[in-house]
Amino acid sequence: MTEVLGKADLPARPMPSSHGERAYTVAIIVLILGLSYSFNGLDRSAFPALLSPISSELGITPAQGGFLSNIFTLNIALFGALSGWFIGRFGRKHVLVGGLLAYSAFTFAIPLASSYTELAFYRAMTGAGEALHITAIFSMIGAYFGKRRGTFFGINNAFFGLGTFLAPLIASQMFQLLGSWRSPFYLFGIAGMVSAISVYLFVPSWFAAAIDQETRRDDEAGDLRCPTTLINLNSAVCTVAFFLTGFSFLAYMALYSLYLKSALAYSVADAGLAFSMFGIGALTAFFGGWLGDKFKRWGLIAGLALMSLNSYVMFFHVISLYGQMATSFIFGVLLSGFLYPRFLAVMQKSVQSHHISAATSIILPVFYFAGFLSGPAFGALVPLVGWQTAGGITVTMTAAGAAVLVCFINPKRMRGP
């Protein structure tokens, strides 16, 4: 079976004929795509890392800060749901480049805001571009690499980890040196635009328009085991569990730095250092995706249970900088290094090969829509129950709920080995 692709994705250049040349070319493509995805990490974590000085200047409350940190997720949900249509109409490559240009432009515009409303608008609009970018990039990688998609999802997600590691460090250091929270957003916006141009120039259509390799290589029984409908038990359970995982993760992303500053009296630099360790942990996605392919459903269950336990320790037992660095690192290992690529692989294997883009355009928006709810929920709970309990409810309990749900995924009703 083949996937319906836009006319813009029809191959324009021949694939390299020799295996060595093709492998080298694909490695360069993966690097270029990974670097483009690292700007998601830069954009996501720079704003929460600078939330304290932004809040001081604009008079923003914790609830408003949580909303601003995660408002981009609403447009990821809205535009992500439409991304399947965009890909079918314009092709993966053009959607990826357009999305990357859009959110880089709005990242550049964030420092121009002079009020809470303007800041919310620019921050929200970054999500529209991110939705198109991330859906296209994971559809592209999943279709080309087939049964090895989990491994390459992990490699791609490691670049996200690189971005989330660098952004708090760069942003906090630029703030310390220049005394302004605005400069990092100009830098990241311009860098993202340069990355978009590199994708346009160097990612060929034969890669962007690839047909699902798993269906070519595996026997037909792989597809026959899988339900023919896009919505089935496995895809539904996977989607709801990913929603809860996103709720937990994006609650952490939204207000963790502010928690360290407000509840534990960390400096902006120390909070940025602890937060950046998430990105170091996410770098383990280079082999986390491969591990996910090996451990399958039990890996998901164990990873979610450990994420819940780690966040409990983070909010209820650890005060020191080194302790927070360690728990933030573990959070990155579990979420970005293992769970995120594994959920995407499970979702794509839970549907027929021609539904890959549609399945991706469902599960990713659901994950990010959870963030639209979790950031404000975390912030609203703080004055009612305190920072620790608010973190326990929004970060710890939701991860535990996801662990229970994935027990109901049936591996026998999935494609591939």
Image (cartoon, rainbow, N blue to C red):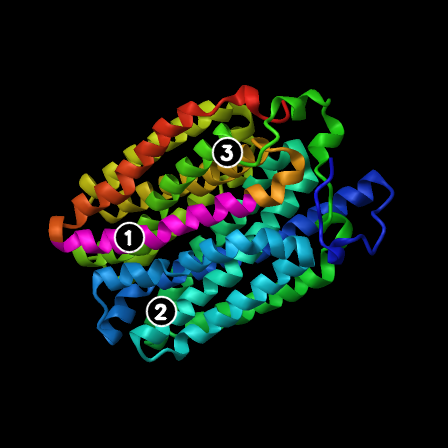
Residue at label 1?
256
- Residue 37 visible to the viewer: no
Residue at label 3?
235
Please report the residue visible at 62 percent of the width from the left and 27 percent of the height from the top. Answer: 415
Amino acid bearing label 3: Ser
In the depicted view, which residue is nearer to us: 177 or 302?
A: 302
Q: Are marks 2 and 3 in contact (CB under 8 Å)?
A: no
Residue range corresponding to the magenta coloring: 360-383
User: Which x, y percent locates residue 206?
Assistant: 77, 49
Gap between marks 2 and 3 measured at Cα: 33 Å
Q: Earlier in the sequence, mark 1 or mark 2?
A: 2
Q: Is residue 61 above or below residue 22?
A: below
Secondary structure category for the residue under label 2:
helix
In this image, 313 relative to 3: left or right?
A: left
Amino acid bearing label 1: Tyr
Please report the residue visible at 37 percent of the width from the left and 78 percent of the height from the top. Answer: 113
Secondary structure category for the residue under label 3:
helix
Q: Which quadrant, please, contains the N terminus?
A: top right
Is residue 312 one of those drawn in magenta? Answer: no
State the image quarter where residue 372 is shown: bottom left
User: Which x, y percent locates residue 205?
Assistant: 76, 53
In this image, 218 relative to 327: left or right?
A: right
Residue 19's disc number: none
Secondary structure category for the residue under label 1:
helix
